[in-house]
Image (cartoon, rainbow, N blue to C red):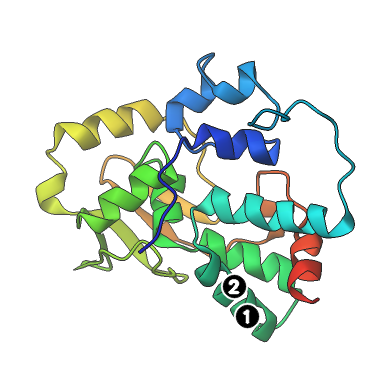
Amino acid sequence: MARYTGAVCRMCRREGQKLFLKGERCYSDKCSFTSRGYAPGQHGQNRKKVSEYGMQLREKQKVRRYYGVLEGQFAKYFEMAERKAGMTGPNLLSICESRLDNVVYRLGFASSRAEARQLVVHGHFTINGKRVDIPSYLTKEGEVIAVCEKSRTSDKFKAVIEANGSRPVPMWLEADKDKLEGKITRKANRDDIDYDVQENLIVEFYSK
């Protein structure tokens, strides 16, 4: 499967917003976006007039990169959002939030979504007691996500939990850091999205 393997900080600079792709580094003075908050490349600091299509494209790319989703998969999520009752934009964000790798990150069991994705692929998590190694698995209300028994004694998880223990957990999740598990109490809604996004631009992009 194709996946971006370049410097992830360039993606934040290209979208003009922190996407928190490198965990703790994004909160420190070492963050590239903090020191160079302009688009990468030779002409990154030049001001350009962005077209309507350009704004729609950038918003779509921003959300896709924020969740680490490939282009085809993101388009499928949009189709799913269109078929659901309610507004397409918030439905799309709710679907992205329900991804297993995002839930693992939100619960504080990983420092970044990329790290969460890797941990899931390596089989460190279970859902309702059954091991799941698919990062794109869409979690459902009532499901319990837990660290596997064999992984709980790992120094890696102890360090991750200690580093991320103070990170707030969204209202749609319940986390038990002692048991190393969390529960989906409800689906994420628009008010739960904690980053700047204009989902209507994404809807307009795919509606052309």
Residue type of the residue flagged with mark 2: Ala
Quarter of the image for the C terminus: give it.
Answer: bottom right
Q: Is residue 189 left or right of residue 169?
A: right
Residue drawn at x 60%, y 64% is 94
Choose top left, top right, bottom left or bottom right for residue 12: top right
User: Which is nearer the eye, 167 or 71?
Assistant: 71
Residue drawn at x 44%, y 70% is 138
Are discs 2 and 1 less than 8 Å apart at CB? yes
Q: Is residue 32 left or right of residue 22?
A: right
Residue 192: % across, % down:
65, 52
Measured along the vertical axis of the image, is residue 9 above or below residue 206? above
Residue type of the residue flagged with mark 1: Glu
Measured along the vertical axis of the image, is residue 104 above or below residue 69? above
Q: Secondary structure at mark 2?
A: helix
* Residue topped by disc 2: 75
Measured along the vertical axis of the image, is residue 124 above or below residue 136? above
Q: Which mark is residue 79?
A: 1
Q: How far apart, in angstroms, are the residues tagged by discs 2 and 1?
A: 6 Å
Q: Secondary structure at mark 1?
A: helix
Residue 37: % across, % down:
68, 24
Choose top left, top right, bottom left or bottom right for residue 43: top right
